[in-house]
Amino acid sequence: MTTGIIITLCVLILISYVFDLTSSKTRIPSVILLLLIGWLLQLFAVQFGINVPDLSEALPVVGTIGLILIVLEGSMDLELDKSKKRVVLNSVFMALIPMLILGTGLAFIVQEVADVSFRTALINVIPLCVISSAIAIPSAQSLCKSNRELVTYESSLSDIFGVVLFNFIALNESFGWNTFGNFFLQILITLVISFAGIIGLSVLLHSITHHVKFVPIIMLLILLYAITKVLHLPGLIFIMLFGIFLANLQLLHKVKWVKVFHVESLKKEYLRFKEIVGEGSFLIRTLFFLLFGFMIKTEELLNIQSLPWALAITAGIFIIRFAFLKLLRIKEITFLYIAPRGLITILLFLSIAESDKIALINTSLVIQIVISTALIMMFGLMTNKKVKSPDIPAESASEPIHEEPQNGAIQ
């Protein structure tokens, strides 16, 4: 039995690696194939009467670790300079404003249909409004560097904004000046913790001479995230800031007390650390989506009652996205399709307290929206014939999103 499990896991991870290698050519997101394999494995286990223990408790754990590594990996690709100002601003608006519009609109509808309070409705719909960096970032690898940066910023910020907004609403029964004051105080505390954590972890990254050094640092990152979560602080901000710090070590030369970081030595360690994070992110992401696919029940996937709602919400996602991209004059058609729901949607949905859950927003609805948005992204990437362009130099990267697309644009 043990040998069979080991063989199965190794084969599945190798298959996932093949999916990852070929996704830039096939334009098929590996997450779709992983979910499919997981679902087929579940059918196989049922058909042959294989007894599988309850894995539902493992899903949030694997998903949280995956989220941390994915946001860290994505942020370690973000180089900051004045030419990126427009990209960063557009990413903030694209991540936040459509989420608020979609969340508010859906909450009003759910409030009327399910006859619940607006707060309860909002808690249930926020997970559906968050773009999944776990799916978006790997799927953007076929794009040029400037466009990958926009996708990475937007999806990572969407994860952060979604978690912060969800926790803010879920942890407060009423909203007043004290509530918002405490919220901004939490943000300030998170920034202070982030600053101290970045300095401490960076010094450790340079100072540890033992041959095992990167795993302890990753464990410290996960530990700090878990502590901030216990304190109801937005820990993903710390993860993202740490990744951005490491990606922009060249800027430390402008800091007077830079000697504490040993920049040149830290750069070498950063490259090795980035490789470890990338491989760990791949492994955890693979396990999460295989596990989630395995837990999908056929009757939930084909639930006719939730399907109209899923299609309507999916349509709303892309209609709002289309309008907002046009408002920002972002002409690259590919960005319209890259709005998948996935890991963070599932994690937030599983985090909804029993007292706040409503029958309308159920597992079937979440699964159908995750799959439908991923399929739309897949078909969008497949129909976009544009060949991956060479990475543009930094001096021209200030307006990558205003390039005229070769094969279609949002008109």
Image: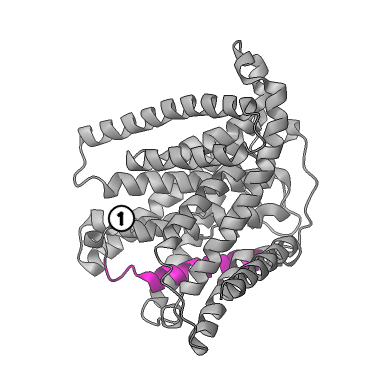
Percent from the top left, x then y, of residue 115?
Answer: 20, 66
> Label 1 crowding class (10 Å Cα cut-off): few <14, some 14-19, many 20+?
many
Label 1: element kind: helix
Q: Amino acid at mark 1?
A: Ile
Percent from the top left, x then y, of residue 386?
Answer: 76, 58
Name, please, the residue furthest toward the front: 2
Task: Tell me where the magenta segment starts and ends, as one range.
Answer: 358-380
Q: Residue at x 41, y 43 (%)?
A: 226
Q: Is residue 183 above or below residue 121?
A: above
Q: Nearer the viewer, residue 282 or 217?
A: 217
Secondary structure, magenta segment, majority class: helix
Q: How many marks?
A: 1
Q: Nearer the viewer, residue 138 or 272?
A: 272
Is residue 321 visible in this depiction of the protein?
yes
Q: Which quadrant holds the N terminus?
A: bottom right
Q: Is residue 6 above or below residue 269?
A: below
Percent from the top left, x then y, of residue 258?
Answer: 62, 15
Percent from the top left, x then y, of residue 285?
Answer: 57, 58
Q: Is residue 185 above or below residue 110?
A: above
Q: Nearer the viewer, residue 410 or 188?
A: 188
Residue 24 is left or right of residue 57, and the answer is right
Q: Quadrant of residue 282?
A: bottom right
Q: Quadrant of residue 5?
A: bottom right
Q: Which residue is mark 1?
A: 123
Q: Is residue 23 above or below residue 306?
A: above
